[in-house]
């Protein structure tokens, strides 16, 4: 039986467990759109109002579920519009797949100015992703799709892309024999496990730092922490790997306090951004042990010793190799955590509102941050109780990712509550996707803190440039009226108590909802004293 390239590609999606594709149809890829339409019982298609929204939704889907987030956009401007989302997926280690078209195969590289033509789109995609390739003939479709899935899920997970020339999507060839892609992992060196265990056994005050590479190693990380009585800290991507109310968990304020006595820093799936990029101080004699699946991490930040392996597997083996159970230190850690909470509570009004959101959000709900005063504060001030429940843009810190990403989170987790917390500036980057939320019934609760400014920029201009403001103050629409015009229930909350009640009502009602919280311009306490603290005395 013969099938088109597009049909073979959709077969590969289904075989690899893909149940949702985000995107916008376009002329170059009509055959792919039709192939998806004919498989509508197997794959849900969610069309968005901007290509960037498609990419961000795929990111949120992947980041919150661990499953592939797939999106399709037209070539050229569509790919470029989705570029910020692909960058976010690269920084956030998300298994994303971009499917796009290209101009007619015989015209690629000729520079004749065809519809949506880029000088070298494949090279552009390769510069943004872990892997990108072109399907030039239907006979290649099955194998190249399988390779793309294997690259995406193996080792350090990151976005991949597949492009198909306009005329190739509809070409037919022999039906491909497609089997699900299998992730490959580096082999574990037993000697490395032994050496890591010796380092840990010799430490008096170890600390574990977890990042996005440890999201699937929560049980193993906790077992190691309990065995050696080490606190577990995170910045953003690792929040919830150890529940915030576990006695061994520390937020980044508490971790900085403890760090002054630390003699061994154990990084598990973490770039160690806090300790080596933000904290401008190191305790004397500090040693660093890294466990990471990406061997290049051992070059980027060379540790005293490194184990290149899957985080869960290596951590479990190291724990098994440790013979002694450390004495209980949870009372000591609790005192540090109490002091840290008192410090965090000075960041107002952010902490008052974040505490209200935490009270209203179920324990298993999802919090999607944004590059905003609330988002920055949430990195230390918002407790999270399980992996993946705090969705971040990782090191890209790209304004405007939040709401669109939250829609993807909700699609992947339809039975969980998802709250998106944005500032007015960031929300306006993707506010058109309220139409997507309403049309597809995606029940994200959008909370927008409106301070009529790009708040971080404005503060820096006031404090660092003699108050000269340029492009940092905003004139905004009536947000409640705007959300209502999309057919979305919308309200305003002016206090933490009102916000808590509004979220509870939105949860009870189900469906999309919008809540605006007015904040006086420039009134927020800077969270950067904790995110980028001064050196210890």
Image (spheres, grey):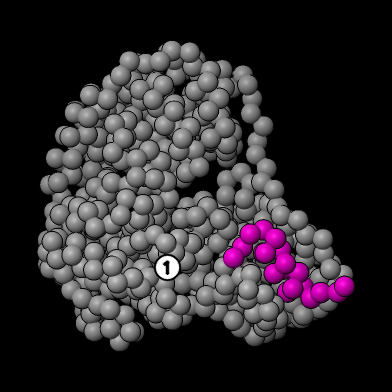
Q: Residue at x 57, y 49 (%)?
A: 157
Q: Residue at x 82, y 60 (%)?
A: 177
The part of the image, by quadrant, that contains residue 280 is top left
The residue to which callout 1 is attached is: 407
The location of residue 344, given as percent across then percent down, is 18, 44
Can residue 12 be seen from the camera position used here?
A: yes
The location of residue 193, given as percent across then percent down, is 57, 22
As displayed, is residue 192 above or below residue 238? above
Q: Nearer the viewer, residue 228 or 168?
A: 228
How many other residues sit within 10 Å of disc 1, few (<14), some (14-19) or many (≥20)?
Answer: many
Left or right position of 464 against 404: left
Q: Is residue 434 magenta?
A: no
The part of the image, by quadrant, that contains residue 476 is bottom left
Q: Nearer the viewer, residue 278 or 468?
A: 278
The part of the image, by quadrant, that contains residue 484 is bottom left
Q: Is residue 4 magenta?
A: yes
Q: Which residues are magenta?
A: 1-19
Q: Nearer the viewer, residue 75 or 342?
A: 342
The location of residue 133, given as percent across then percent down, is 70, 62
Q: Quadrant of the C terminus?
A: top left
Q: Residue at x 82, y 64 (%)?
A: 176
Q: Quadrant of the N terminus?
A: bottom right
Can residue 472 be seen from the camera position used here?
A: no
Q: Residue at x 56, y 75 (%)?
A: 45
Secondary structure at numbered mark 1: helix
Q: List the single residue furthest toward the front.
A: 508
As displayed, is residue 18 above or below residue 210? below
The location of residue 47, given as percent across then percent down, is 52, 78
As displayed, is residue 393 above or below residue 71? above
Left or right position of 311 against 229: right
As displayed, is residue 282 above or below residue 322? below
């Amino acid at each position: 039986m013969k099938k088109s390239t597009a049909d073979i590609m959709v077969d590969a999606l289904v075989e690899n467990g893909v149940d949702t594709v985000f995107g916008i149809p376009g002329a170059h890829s009509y055959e792919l759109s039709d192939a998806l339409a004919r498989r509508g019982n197997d794959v849900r298609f969610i069309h968005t109002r901007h290509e960037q929204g498609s990419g961000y939704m795929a990111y949120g889907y992947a980041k919150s579920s661990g499953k592939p987030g797939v999106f399709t956009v037209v070539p050229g401007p569509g790919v470029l519009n989705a570029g910020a989302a692909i960058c976010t997926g690269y920084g956030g280690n998300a298994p994303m797949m971009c499917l796009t078209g290209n101009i007619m195969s015989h015209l690629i590289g000729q520079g004749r100015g065809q519809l949506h033509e880029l000088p070298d789109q494949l090279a552009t995609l390769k510069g943004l992703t872990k892997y990108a390739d072109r399907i030039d003939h239907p006979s290649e479709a099955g194998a190249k799709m399988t390779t793309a899935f294997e690259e995406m899920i193996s080792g350090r997970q990151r976005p991949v892309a597949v492009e198909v020339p306009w005329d190739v999507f509809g070409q037919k060839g022999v039906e491909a024999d497609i089997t699900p892609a299998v992730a490959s992992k580096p082999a574990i060196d037993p000697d490395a496990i032994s050496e890591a265990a010796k380092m840990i056994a010799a430490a008096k005050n170890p600390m574990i730092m977890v990042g996005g590479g440890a999201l699937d190693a929560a049980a193993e990380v906790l077992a190691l922490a309990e065995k050696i009585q080490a606190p577990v800290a995170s910045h953003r991507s690792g929040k919830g790997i150890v529940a915030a109310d576990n006695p061994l968990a520390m937020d980044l304020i508490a971790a900085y306090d403890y760090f002054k006595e630390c003699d061994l820093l154990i990084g598990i799936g973490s770039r160690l951004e806090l300790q080596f990029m933000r904290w401008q101080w190191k305790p004397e004699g500090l040693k660093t042990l890294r466990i990471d699946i990406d061997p290049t991490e051992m070059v980027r930040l060379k540790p005293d010793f490194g184990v290149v392996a899957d985080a869960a597997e290596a951590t479990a083996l190291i724990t098994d190799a440790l013979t002694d159970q450390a004495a209980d230190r949870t009372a000591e850690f609790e005192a540090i955590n109490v002091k840290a909470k008192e410090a965090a509570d000075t960041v107002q009004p952010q902490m008052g509102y974040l505490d209200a959101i935490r009270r209203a959000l179920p324990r298993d709900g999802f919090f999607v941050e944004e590059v905003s005063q609330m988002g920055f504060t949430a990195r230390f001030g918002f407790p999270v109780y399980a992996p993946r429940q705090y969705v971040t843009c990782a090191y890209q810190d790209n304004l405007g990712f939040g709401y669109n990403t939250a829609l993807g989170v909700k699609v992947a987790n339809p039975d969980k509550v998802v709250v998106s917390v944005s500032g007015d500036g960031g929300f306006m980057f993707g506010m058109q996707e309220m139409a997507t939320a309403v049309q597809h019934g995606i029940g994200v609760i959008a909370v927008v803190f409106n301070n009529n400014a790009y708040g971080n920029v404005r503060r820096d201009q006031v404090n660092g440039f003699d108050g000269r403001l340029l492009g940092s103050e905003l004139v905004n629409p009536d947000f409640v009226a705007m959300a209502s015009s999309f057919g979305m229930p919308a309200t305003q909350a002016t206090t933490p108590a009102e916000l808590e009640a509004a979220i509870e009502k939105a949860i009870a009602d189900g469906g999309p909802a919008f809540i605006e919280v007015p904040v006086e311009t420039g009134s927020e306490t800077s969270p950067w004293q904790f995110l980028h603290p001064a050196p210890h005395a």
